[in-house]
Amino acid sequence: MQKRTERRAHQPRHGRSRRARVARLLAGTAAVAATSFLGSAGLSATAGASTAHRWVAVDRHVAPAMHSHVAINATGYDMVGTDGGVFVFPSGQTSGYYGSLPGMNIHINNIVGMVGSPTGKGYFLVGSDGGVFAFGDANFAGSLPGMKIYVNDIVGIIPTSDGLGYFLVGADGGVFTFGDAVYVGSLPGNSVSVNDVVGIAATPDNKGYWVLENNGTITNFGTAPAITSLTCPAGPGQCGNLVAIVADNTGQGVWVVDQFGNVYNLGDAPFYGDLSTLGAAQPSNIVSLVPYGNDTGYWLIGDDGGIFGYNAPFLGSLPQLGVVVNNVVGAVPTT
């Protein structure tokens, strides 16, 4: 382990039950877009290609951990709140927004994250029930409600490298695969009983993944190489505040981040800095790490929409705009 020392909304595909559309501006500056729709008819997985796997019939919260690795030349970024409202940066731009939920008159509060399509021209939103909303060129490949699987513990989603599928993970480490994502195991399948999983990261070949527990344990499956589990500052098993795991583009390393913005780079993932240098001013509300470019930097995202760039450009934030929230759960780079 190493450690430092609007816009037209594309019609989304979805996983629950109905349509609408609209977009709104917040304070005339940030596009807090709202467009998506819910619906469950015809969304069950196709045999062989889109399948959901978990070891118990409906196998069995923690911080949201939705993180995709989109190696694009980003010119902006979007953030999402638990209500599915999307904030677009740079503020006022006409590109980068592909839809969200409130402007569709869809009122929920269980969105736990946002991950981007491989092109940076679309994104997925996911709820704690495994409902998936796809916008722009993001490919909808199924959802748990659409398969009549009812849970409330989903904490992570990661798309496959070609964007034609995705993995979902629950707090118990149960894994669901859709599209061309390949199921290669789960914690319940290994007879491991936990309820503290915070995220999942996948390999570029779509045949492997890592599952992160809040105690720092990292379990590898399929083609994902073994990575030494995290020894936290307070000692093994004493982390208690990890929020995300993100794979690098080589599939040989990951970043792990905690709520204080401490970044742990494991394997060959590069380290560019973290919030430990802020000392007493170090925040405690970090929810996500978003890679920039081809692993040339990253952003740390706070639940207030604050953003910290490390070798990545600052393009605006909600506090800078005077927008006060505390429900941001994820972000994606956009082109």
Image (tube, rainbow, N blue to C red):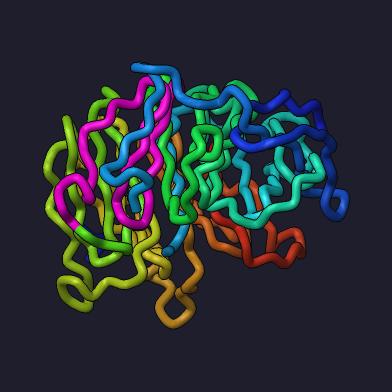
Q: Position of residue 335 (x, y in %)?
A: 60, 28
Residue at the image point whose x is 18% and y is 49% from the top: 219
Q: Position of residue 214 (x, y in %)?
A: 30, 64
Quarter of the picture holding the N terminus? bottom left
Q: Position of residue 114 (x, y in %)?
A: 54, 43
Left or right side of 186 for 236: left
Residue 164 among those drawn in magenta: yes
Residue at the image point whose x is 82% and y is 52% from the top: 26
Residue extending farthest right: 28
User: Looking at the picture, does residue 16 appear above or below residue 162?
Assistant: below
- Of 270 and 227, the residue lying toward us: 227
Left or right side of 28 for 230: left
Q: Which stretch did the figure color magenta?
A: 163-192
Q: Quadrant of residue 333?
A: top right
- Of 314 and 80, the residue lying toward us: 80
Q: Position of residue 282 (x, y in %)?
A: 45, 74
